[in-house]
Image: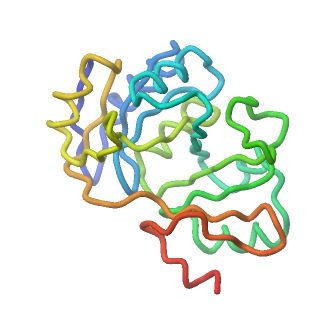
Amino acid sequence: MEYYELHPDNPQKRYINKAVEVLRNGGVIIYPTDTLYAFGCDIFNKDALERIYMIKNEPTSKLYSFVCPDLKDISKYAKVSDYAYKKMKKLLPGPYTFVLPASREVPKKLWTKRKTVGIRIPDNPVALELVKELGHPILSTSVTNRLGETYHNPEEIKNVFGFAVDLMLAMGTLDGEASTIVDLSGEEPEIIREGAGDVSFFF
């Protein structure tokens, strides 16, 4: 595994470019978000997606979210109502995953039975730069072991998952919690999981 430590205030572009190259070649990476470290791959690469299921020991029926760079990009991959747009505009980038009706651009592997998808715009420059440079979304699922336990320390992550992924971008210890998941696919917001994001805005 390639391992690069990023400067917290000015992440080195050359390391981000190396990660993008790995993604384009069908690889799996670990990268920082505004909450936790995440496993990532190109959402259009089926083999890379299967690798992440194997690494996490999760069934292929498990649904993963993905990262977009901005609200404009979200509209390519989801149907966004005026109501949903206004809510997201005030909260993104931020520690939220929004569930929205999927567009045909998204691989059906990432659809729920209700034909929805989970989308993130994390408030982290590395995650956003990765997806901008790649040109389309990156999978986002927290770095956990096969027992579902979360890892926060990059050195520990490297020791545990160095054999399983192709590259890691480290940005210090991330002590956050998982993102808040909000379903905006209906007429009223539904909180699916309370996490790092404040939910009071929805009440």
Q: Is residue 94 above or below residue 188?
A: above
> Total of numbered circles in the picture?
0
The structure residue drawn at horizontal position 61% and vertical position 19%, both measured from the top left corner, is 45
Q: Nearer the viewer, residue 136 or 163?
A: 163
Q: Position of residue 48 (x, y in %)?
A: 52, 19
- Tell whether 149 sits left or right of 19: left
Q: Position of residue 156 (x, y in %)?
A: 16, 37
> Which quadrant would the N terminus be assigned to in this image?
top left
Q: Position of residue 200 (x, y in %)?
A: 55, 84
The structure residue drawn at horizontal position 64% and vertical position 59%, both measured from the top left corner, is 98
What scheme was used to colour the molecule?
rainbow
- Tell whether 149 sits left or right of 57: left
Q: Position of residue 4 (x, y in %)?
A: 24, 30
Q: Is residue 197 above or below residue 50?
A: below
The structure residue drawn at horizontal position 21% and vertical position 28%, both measured from the top left corner, is 160
> Which quadrant would the C terminus be assigned to in this image?
bottom right
Residue 185, located in which quarter of the rendered image?
A: bottom right
